[in-house]
Amino acid sequence: METNLLHAHKEVEHSFFQAFEKRPHHAWILKGPKGIGKLDFAKKIAGQLLTQETPDSHIQNKIEAQNHPSFLYISLEDSALQSISIEQIRKISHFVTQTTEGWKVIILNSLNDLTVNGSNGLLKVLESPPSKTVFFLIHHNGFSLLPTITSRCAALSFAPLPEEELSSQLPSSLTEAECKILLSLAQGCAHRLTDLTDHHALSLYDSFLETLQSLLHKDDESPLSAFIGKIGRDKTKLSLFLLIVERWLQGSIKEAALKEENPLFLREPYSLETLLKTHQAVSHLIISDKKLMLDARQLMLTIFFELKNLRTS
C-alpha cells in the first residue's frame, strides 16, 4: 500500500521540494490525520536528501533499520514512558553536533507525544540548528502546538485520501455495504484502513451492533459482558471499539439530519436530538480516557450506558 500512498501525496512532495529549493528551511511540521502517511513521506524525503551527494541504492532499508549515520528517528516506541522522554530530546542535541558529510535528517514521531519539558528541549535545538540539518516533526490532528515551535517551522498539510483511491485496497470478497463501513472508519487514512482489515474490524462492528440491540430492545446485558470480555485489556481492540462507536454515532447523526432513505448506519429512527446528546457524552468519555487512562472495562460499560439513552428516542 505504501507505493499508492506515496503516489497520493505527490503534490505535497512537489510543494516541499519547490519551497526547499528556494529556501532550505531546517524544520518542517507534517500535519494531518494520524495514519495518513506522514511518516512514510518523511522517510522517503529523508532518503532523497541523504543521497543527494552520496548515492545509495539501499538508503530506504537503512532508514527503516535506523542504521544510517546521518539519520535519527525519535518516537514514543523507544520510550519507557507514555511520552517522548527528555533523554530522547537530548539525544537529538548530541546528534546534530556530530560531524558528517552532507545532510543530517531527524524525524520526530510525534509532537503530540511531547511533554512540556520535551517541547522546551526541542525548541532549544530548533533555535540554533546546524547547517544542512533537516527536522521532520510529525503532528497529528487534534492537538495544539506551542506557538514558539510553529513559528520556527515551515508546514506541510496532508489531507485525507479520496475513498475511490482507498477502495482499491479492499478485499474483493466484501459487499458494497462492508466496503462503505470500512472506508468510513478509515476516514481517508491508508494505514488505518490496513489496520482495520488486519484486525477484523467488520466482525467487531457487527458484535457492537448486536450488543447494542440487545441492550436497547431486550435490556439483556449478557451480550455486553461477552463483548467486553472479547476486548479485555487489548489496547488495539479497545481503540478500534472507540473508533467504531464514534464513527457509528457520527454516521447516524448525518443520516438522521439528511433523512436518507437508505441509511448505512442508522438502522432505527432515533431522533437527531438524542443522537447529538449521546454523541457529545460519548465523545467526552473518549477524550477523558485519552487524558486519564480510565479502566477499560469501566469505560466500555459507561459508553454503553450512554448509548442506552437512544431507546428514549
Image (cartoon, rainbow, N blue to C red):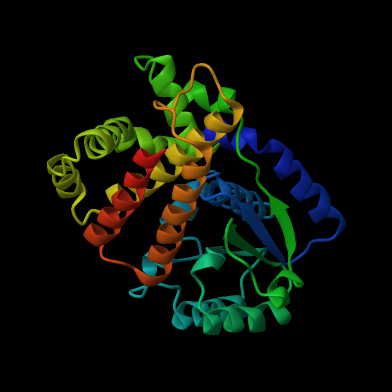
Residue 295 position by quadrant: bottom left
| Residue 273 as seen in the image, left or right of residue 99 | left
Which residue shows up at 59% across the image and 32% down it? 257
Residue 5 position by quadrant: top right
Task: Please say whether residue 62 is visible from this viewpoint.
Answer: no
Which residue shows up at 57% across the image and 59% down it? 142
Q: In this view, does 125 lie above or below 256?
A: below
Taking depth in this image into account, of 25 and 85 the one nearest to the observer is: 85
Taking depth in this image into account, of 225 and 171 the one nearest to the observer is: 225
Residue 123 position by quadrant: bottom right
Which residue shows up at 47% across the image and 42% down it? 275
Q: Where is residue 143 in the image (x, y as percent from the top left)?
A: 58, 64
| Residue 140 as seen in the image, left or right of residue 263 | right
Q: Position of residue 116 (x, y in %)?
A: 55, 82
**Quadrant placement of the C terminus:** top left
Q: Position of residue 309 (x, y in %)?
A: 36, 46
Q: Is residue 198 above or below residue 74?
A: above
Q: Is residue 20 above or below residue 69?
A: above
Residue lying at the far right of the rendered structure: 22
Which residue shows up at 67% across the image and 61% down it? 29
Taking depth in this image into account, of 59 and 254 the one nearest to the observer is: 254
